Amino acid sequence: MTDPTTPSSHGVPAAPPTGPASGRDDLTTLTAAGARRLLDAREVSAVEVTEAHLARIAAVDDRVRAYIEVTAGVARGQAEAADARIARGEAAPLTGIPVALKDVLCTTDAPTTAASRILAGYRSPYDATAVARLRAAGAIFLGKANTDEFAMGSSTENSAFFPTHNPWDLGRVPGGSSGGPAAAVAAGEAIAGIGSDTSGSIRQPAGFCGVVGLKPTYGRVSRYGLIAFASSLDQVGPFTRSVEDAALVMGAMAGHDPLDATTVDLPVPQFRPEAEADLRGVRVGVAAEYTVEGMEPGVKAAVDAAIAGLEALGAELVPISLPHTEYALPTYYITAPAEASANLARFDGIRFGNVVEGATLRETYERTRGEGFGPEVKRRIMLGTYALSSGYYDAYYVKAQKVRTLIKRDFDLAFETVDVIACPTSPTVAFGIGARTDDPYQMYLADVFTIPANMSGIPGLALPCGFSGGMPVSLQLLAKPFDEASLFRVGHAYEQSQGWHLRHPDLGLA
Ligand code: GLN
């Protein structure tokens, strides 16, 4: 069998796997759909699936460090309840499926920290809507997964607690900000993960860790109980081991929520395997703007091969232009910090989390925030406050909003002639731990291909499409607002034709 993790000498990824998925083949390599079949056939119990994942966490998480808090007690209680529900014949698609929750999602039965000292030990009095819906579906909560502090970062190195390591190479980052749930799904420490994506924080770590990640359309999943970073850009979405699983998690989590006025009342797209067999009649846009300087040759080769793979399945490739792409990154770094500076004003030591007392109220605020926030969060608050201050507001913030409209218009025009757009998720594979921490601009560049979807509200799916130098490469598919169904269709057809998603890192424990 050809090992696809070993690139051939000319930098083109080797052929996809033809044999068994990996040496490791147990309950912790299952997809949610696969686990569902076993659970419904009573071949395994939810307790067994949960214990297998807790054992895997015990075996590898001291090296991967995907979790801030493992909630074994919660998970065991939920697993017993799930088995009882299955026995009653009342199972929902996610009943008994273990998930990892990014620690920016409020949960009642574990602390919610946003990986920040300012919230260390904080316990929410309510569940985020996404969490409440998964709970109602009977999903199992294995724990709260690591993230960059307040979801600000591209490597999970900005966590106030510890960095997470990439399961494919422990010396590398898992991406970020949702590096915890991405690494957990890749390492067999959860069947699915839930993250948030403000400019790539689901898709980029999914790509770096070789799993599927979906940023839904803005308004598709409730943000109620998601600790807000940039409210006009944030979306909650899944990490999974297959495209079908991403649709399953969306089915449980998405939809209108009276507690989030930006959610829309539209039916959640269902996954229809019968419609996903080939891609005849699908128009796939390929934009010249999605090749940038500094792009890794192995990444470009794998993505080009993936796009050729779509054509081989019957899709028609259509050249398109998205001329404002290059302005997405600077526009994001005005818009997101501006919104963050307002959203993070609430962390004052009085209402939430930790307080560092001072002699006066003002000093209490200053000491709490001064000691509670890490350097990247402070950088964002200062950038945002500056961009919103009188005299600069028009020059920076208002200008950025105008450019944002132009970026959105590029997509509106493109989607008049294509159904989906195919491009890389990131310009490189996962980089080394510490390699970019001294250079924020290099760190920000990791999101260059993922930001435009947030700026325009459209959905984006990241899925494995090969390897470069032994590290996973990811294909990104974009579609028009609320057309996740096209992403599922194209993504599933590609995934099934290639089999890249069947590879798992073994962490030396195969
Ligand atoms: N790298 C982005 C940032 O630091 C990630 C944001 C996100 O999607 N949460 O802002």
Image (tube, rainbow, N blue to C red):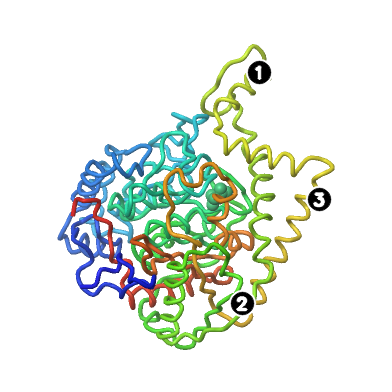
Which of the labelled discs sits on residue 363, or is there none? 1
Which of the labelled discs sits on residue 473, or is there none? none
Label 2 – label 3 distance at C-alpha? 31 Å
Q: Is residue 460 above or below residue 70?
A: below
Drawn side of residue 12 relative to residue 377, left or right: left
Q: Secondary structure at mark 1?
A: helix
Is the shortest distance between ligand 1 and the CB of mark 2 under 8 Å? no
Residue at image location 21% in from the left, 51% down from the top: 508
Image quarter of the N terminus: bottom left
Check disc 3 and report the residue beneath it.
395
* The one of 268 and 246 positioned closer to us in this rendering: 246
Q: Is residue 185 above or below residue 343?
A: below
Any part of residue 259 in sight:
no
Q: Nearer the viewer, mark 1 or mark 3?
A: 3
Which of the labelled discs sits on residue 415, or is there none? 2
Drawn side of residue 210 relative to residue 449, left or right: left
Residue at image location 36% in from the left, 50% down from the top: 166
Three-letter code for the amino acid on which mark 3 is drawn = Ala
Image quarter of the C terminus: bottom left
Label 1 – label 2 distance at C-alpha? 53 Å
Estimate the x, y position of residue 271 in percent, counting from the top left. 40, 71
Characterize the local packing of mark 2: few (<14), some (14-19) or many (20 or more) Cα atoms within 10 angstroms. Answer: many
Mark 1 or 2, nearer chain start: 1
